[in-house]
Image (cartoon, helix red, strand yellow):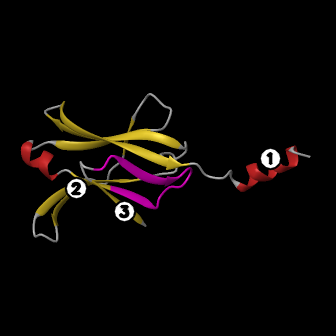
Amino acid sequence: MKYIHATPEMIVLPLGRQGEGGRTTVIFDVTEMAEELEGASFSIFVQRPYESESYEVVSPGPISGVITPEGETEQRESWLVSRYDTAIAGKGKCKVVAVKNGAVIMSREWKTEIEKSMPEPDTFTEALADDD
């Protein structure tokens, strides 16, 4: 399992190779947003490379009360990256949105990057056969 701790300072989140899923979890520290917007709920949205629409990913819910090595308490949201999320290689985006009373109050956005992968074995074999 690979964990990416997304901080506001990070510019690009490397999600892995095209078509991989279920092994990378992105963890978002939403402590400051939660403190500033008491009672807000959080959602995570993803925009895949070359697509104009975003979609909401299912999060297992907030992870509250995480104690850091410095002894501080954090609230986190997480996203288990799926094969659907990484189906297209290239640069995309993800966003954590804070919602309160039905309105988006605040959001943070990151760029994502998915490495191009070799074709699946069947596709690769068919491509070789076509060269004959």
Alpha carbon distance from label 1 to label 2: 44 Å
> On the image, which quarter does residue 80 sit in?
bottom left
Q: Taking the image as drawn, is residue 45 in sight? A: no
Is residue 120 placed above or below 1 in the rendered structure? above
Quadrant housing residue 68: bottom left
The circle drawn on residue 65 is none
Q: Amino acid at mark 3?
A: Tyr
Q: Which residues are magenta?
A: 10-26
Q: Looking at the rendering, in which quadrant would you find the N terminus?
A: bottom left
Task: Provide the secondary structure element on which disc 1 rests.
Answer: helix
> Going from the N terminus, do you reach mark 1 or mark 2 first?
2
Residue sitting nearer the eye, 108 or 23: 108
Disc 1: which residue: 127
Determine the image quadrant of residue 17: bottom right
Q: Horizontally, is 62 left or right of 83 in the view? A: left
Looking at marks 3 and 1 on the same chain, the residue that comes earlier in the sequence is marked by 3
Mark 1 neighbour density, 10 Å: few (under 14) some (14–19) many (20 or more): few
Calculate the distance from the C-alpha at mark 3 to the C-alpha at mark 1: 35 Å
Would you say residue 12 sits in the magenta stretch?
A: yes
Q: Nearer the viewer, residue 73 or 131?
A: 131
Three-letter amino acid code of the residue under disc 2:
Arg
For the point 80% across and 46% down, which residue is it?
127
Image mark for residue 76? 2
72 falls in the magenta region: no
Q: Residue at x 19, y 50 (%)?
A: 30
Residue 83 visible: yes
Image side of residue 82 versus residue 122, left or right:
left
Look at the picture and state if 62 lies above or below 89.
Answer: below
| Residue 3, disc | 3
| Amino acid bearing label 1 | Ala
Q: CA distance from mark 2 to mark 3?
A: 13 Å
